[in-house]
Amino acid sequence: MEIALRENTYARAWIRSPSFDLVFIVGIAVMAILSGLIVVSKPSLFGLVLFMDLWLLGYHHVISTYTRLCFDKESFQQNRFLLFGLPVIVLSGVVLVSVTVGVWAITSIYLYWQWFHYTRQSWGVSQTYRHKTGEKTDENENILKAAFYLLPLWGILYRSWQAPDSFIGVELVVIPTPGWLVDFAGALALGVALAWCYQRFRSHMQGKLVGVHTLYMLSHFAIFFVGYYMIEDITYGWLTINIWHNAQYVLFVWLFNNKRFKDGIEPKARFLSRISQSKNRLLYMVICLSITTIAYLSFSKLEGLIFMFGVPAAILIYQTLNFHHYIVDSVIWKMRKPAMKKTLGLK
């Protein structure tokens, strides 16, 4: 009886299936880290890897957000402000900061905001795995959270201490950070991570640990350590974690839509529910990539026509899209919402 219950718990631990989840947890992290290491060893490949990341993952990752916002009538009506009002506000803010402070300020805001956004997305995914089985482990909640957040904090403090002059080819100014603070954060992060590992080992020895959430946590530690600390060049390190973040987001959005319409075609959302069926996953990706290509080709054409107040159009367009995306994500992907829990089957 105990063995049967244990096997059932393992079966419920995956958010979709062992094959999907292992690709999601391990495969994406390995791909991202290898991409970063390849670029470090051969910098001439940076342009190619960046191009593939942006067109196959990055732009698609931003556009895929709109499958939650406006691909069905109900979502469109609920998210009118996010679709029409918020972009105007964000664009106005980007233009104002660029003109009054300088383009470097937008780059600096992006450095820290994308770090926070990546960390928070990972926390949301982590919580999804943690609550999928309702698994109870005898561990201190504060140690879990501290272990999760301290390593990324160490990473961004290290980048600030490095104080590079540029980031992704654009002027950068960082928050002044002393070396002793970086060392302190690093020691604290590693110490708390070891304490968390001990808690999980103890739960394993007691037969209470399923392990899927633990595997995700280890992938989280690995990607932030490599992307923010192990790789010296800030742009190459960013590329590593950006690939991981983008691929993770694209797959998770598809998974959410697939689970949302698991019962078949929904009359009130025929288009989205049809392309979100498992048998149509290739069609879903093709449609999203097609929309992405059309949208970003249009944006690139605008670059040659717009040069607002001396600020390059690329800065205005792409950072407006990024910042808008960050705000929207913080609204629509709250795992504590009942509708989210129901769709993802969380306890």
Image (spheres, rainbow, N blue to C red):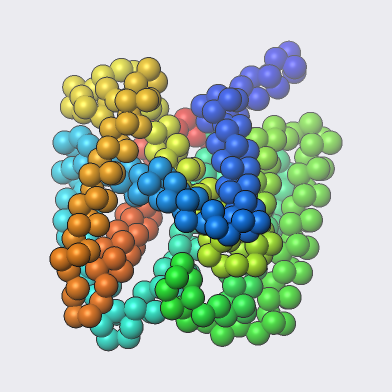
Q: Is residue 195 left or right of residue 182?
A: right
Camera sees residue 342: no
Is residue 235 something one can see in this rendering?
yes
Query: Would you identify the image quadrant in which residue 134 lies?
Result: top right
Above or below: residue 338 compared with residue 261: below
Asked where in the image residue 224 lies, by quadrant, the reply is bottom right
Q: Find residue 234 and report its horizontal and vertical position in percent.
A: 56, 67
Q: Quadrant of residue 205?
A: top right
* Residue shown at 62% from the left, 51% from the top: 38
Q: Looking at the picture, does residue 201 appear above or below residue 263?
A: below
Side of 97 relative to 214 (left or right): left
Horizontally, residue 262 falls left or right of residue 12, namely left
Q: Across the whole image, how many numbered discs are drawn on residues? A: 0
Nearest the viewer among 102 and 148 is 102
* Left/right of residue 256 with respect to residue 33 in the rendered view: left
| Residue at screen point 62% across, 56% down | 42
Location of residue 24 in the rendering, given as x and y in whole percent from the top left corner? 55, 36
Q: Nearer the viewer, residue 25 or 141?
A: 25
Front residue of 43/275: it is 43
Q: Compared with residue 213, is residue 239 higher up or lower down, i.e. above or below? A: below
**Residue located 82% across and 35% down the image:** 206
